[in-house]
Amino acid sequence: MPYKIYITRKIPQAGLRLIVREGIKFTINPRDKPVSRRELLKTVRDKDGLLCLLGDKIDKEVIETGARLKIISAYAVGYDNIDLAYATRKRIMVTNTPGVLTEATAELAWAIIFASARRIAEADRFIRTGRFKTWGPQLMLGTELHHKTLGIIGAGRIGQAVARKAAGFKMRIIYTDTVPRPELEKPTGARRVTLPRLLAESDVVTIHTPLTAGTRHLISRQELSLMKPTAYLINTSRGPVVDEAALVAALRHKRIAGAGLDVYEQEPRIHPGLLKLENVVLLPHIGSATTQTREKMALMAAENLIAGLKGKRPPNLVNPKVLSPRC
């Protein structure tokens, strides 16, 4: 009997072709929007595998309902939407797609840094609403980045890729992380500092940390108060790392110069205060949104799924304890 899987959103054809080639039967959410809770619970009941997105809440109820599940393959690097501990207890493999979106996300972080520092989105709106009448010495003044200080919160793959791209601007690089990163320090001259020092000294603060209990609201009112009034806060990691209400207040009262966000605390809901501000760049979670990266993610998610269904260890297994006989 062929394996049956559910795919919660249409993925690039490269991944689907691989699944078809293996003779796996799949059901896919036909709508270009997140699957409803009701539909997810209904469809997962008789499935051997689940290929899901970061926005799909795969909690205890979903895992219990999917009594036949052998593997949950996340089409994402992050997997905080999955109850990993419970999946492991039920001996269900969980996988992700690490590494593949490093450069794409780092490039987007830089796009937001540029857009924030030079007021690109604001200037575009200025043009489109017919307000541009003439060039002027004080028109849309931004800030230059060369020789400024770049502060990186979370110096993993993406944080390090962001740091490498700062070399052309001769920026001073400081970072905070749970462990020293000599592989970052040697080629870039980066120095590890405490979070308060990083916030106080940086002209641009860019966040690349995973979402954990310890990083939720890592940046809130107290942390924002430590930043320079000329500094910019960039977040391409996870929305809840930043307290959006506190950020709105800081931006509204010009306690910091600006911000750029690709992720949100209650995504896809955007804090209404952010929508009213000119000094924030808002993007719809497109960190990995390049054709090349999304196709690679589809292939990796499919490869993980296929391996797990065949009883093999998937290439990107995040809960290896599930393979232990004592699990």
Image: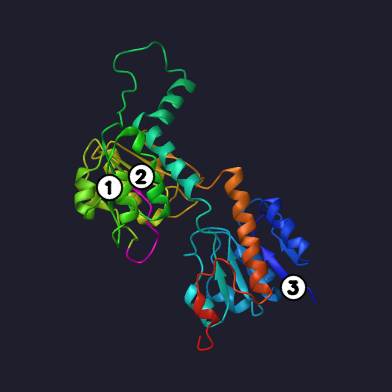
Of 237 and 244, the residue lying toward us: 237
Dot 3 or dot 2: first in sequence order is 3
Q: Is 35 left, or right, of 284 in this rendering?
A: right
Determine the residue positioned at 33% across, 51% down.
184
Q: Amino acid at mark 2?
A: Ala
Of 33 and 149, the residue lying toward us: 149
From mark 3 to mark 2, how far is it between C-alphas?
A: 44 Å
Give me the disc on residue 3. 3
Q: Is residue 211 magenta?
A: yes
* Secondary structure category for the residue under label 1: loop
Question: Label 3: few (<14), some or many (≥20) within 10 Å?
Answer: some
From this viewpoint, which residue is outermost toward the top?
134
Q: Are marks 1 and 2 in contact (CB under 8 Å)?
A: yes
Dot 1 or dot 2: first in sequence order is 2
Dot 1 or dot 3: first in sequence order is 3
Of 269 and 46, the residue lying toward us: 46
Q: Amino acid at mark 3?
A: Tyr
Depth check, mark 1 against mark 3: the one in front is: 1
- Counting from the top left corner in percent of width and height, residue 49 is at 66, 71
- The residue wearing badge 2 is 163
Give me the disc on residue 190. 1
